[in-house]
Image (cartoon, helix red, strand yellow):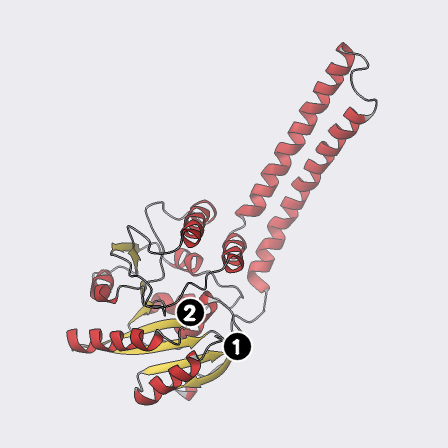
Amino acid sequence: MKKISFIIPCYGSEKTIEIVIEEIEKIVTEKKEDYDYEVIAVNDNSPDNVWNVLKKIAQNNHKVKIISLAKNMNRPSALMAGMYHATGDYIILMDDDGQCPMENLWNLIKPLEDGHDVSIAKYPKYKQSLFKSFGTIVNRKMTEIVMEKPKDLNFTNFTAIKKYIVDEIIKYKNPYPYMTGLLLRTTSDIVNIEMEERERISGNTNFTFKKMLKLWINGFTAFSVKPLRIATVIGFLIAMIGFIYGIYIIIHKIIIHNSIIPGYSSLMATLLFIGGIIMLMLGLIGEYIGRIYICINNSPQYVIKEKYNIDEETEEIK
């Protein structure tokens, strides 16, 4: 019998999480008798009453395992906490708001049974705010440039992963994990399964501009030194512009006398040239600092405050 682990980061979902877990139980137990399941719900220090709701659910269903984090660490860290405790053959990453189309669960899992490593839902149309859609587009373009993600591959919050891939992902101990980067650096055998996204069951998105900005910065710095290389190229280009502009000023000064304030031209050309050289040097130094930062930053990904229905031997503070 195979086992599926559902990992659900919870934030502001006291009105929806019970519905989501009940649907998981119904779909797995009624449609596939040869599959067992567990739900690992991670309370990401939510300000509402979701932890008490989760405790009530876990008391009535031992297959629901719950974790409470001591501090809000955002979705990727909550996923890492859940994956560390997952025991299933297949791990499903999903949301707590009911938008993930659970009726397509077996379509999402089928590619894994066919030999693929990761299967990700692809939505022809996103049922979300224009603000969040904009963030999704920018994030997609960023990963294509910085992480060399294939253009035809979409990453969404409804994802199925084989256990051995998850075992490799949780070896990453540095702070600010970025799930897209972790998946791309672990395997290239990733497929999309097209399906329709649902509407939210209740409430509004918790995806704020601040969280979106953190996501972008994390994506830029966590798994690539390309931004530093871009800084190097920009520095070189500015240095060249400064050099060319300096030649132009000299020629212009010779041909057209007294047309420019004395000292201004040479000062601007010098500032541009030196500024470009400084950026070039900082880019080269940053190349090495970026590699060091990626490897040795030891801030915690998450800190577990409380657990329920989880075996003691897996208990650990990360």
Residues at marks 1 and 2, CA–CA distance in whole angstroms = 13 Å
Residue depicted at 37% across the width and 72% down the height: 8
* Residue 117 x/y as whole percent: 30, 61
Name the kind of residue labelled 1 in the image.
Val
**Image quarter (top left, top right, bottom left or bottom right) of the N terminus:** bottom left
Q: Report the side of 183 relative to 104 (left or right).
A: right
SS under mark 1: loop
| Numbered tag placed on residue 79 in the rendering | 2
Q: Looking at the image, can residue 125 be seen? A: yes
In this picture, is 20 found above or below 152? below
Residue 98 appears in which quarter of the rendering? bottom left
Sequence-first disc among 1 and 2: 2
Q: Report the side of 208 relative to 286 (left or right).
A: left
Label 1: how many Cα within 10 Å (few below 14, some 14–19, many 20+):
some
Name of the residue lying farthest toward the front: 203
Label 2: how many Cα within 10 Å (few below 14, some 14–19, many 20+):
many
Callout 1–callout 2 Cβ contact below 8 Å: no
In this picture, is 269 found above or below 34? above
* Residue 316 x/y as whole percent: 48, 81
Q: Looking at the image, can residue 1 be seen? A: no
Q: Report the side of 150 relative to 145 (left or right).
A: left
Along the viewing direction, whichever of 47 and 271 lies nearer the viewer: 47
Along the viewing direction, whichever of 261 and 4 lies nearer the viewer: 261
Name the kind of residue labelled 2 in the image.
Leu
* Residue 80 x/y as whole percent: 44, 70
| Numbered tag placed on residue 20 in the rendering | none
| Numbered tag placed on residue 303 in the rendering | 1
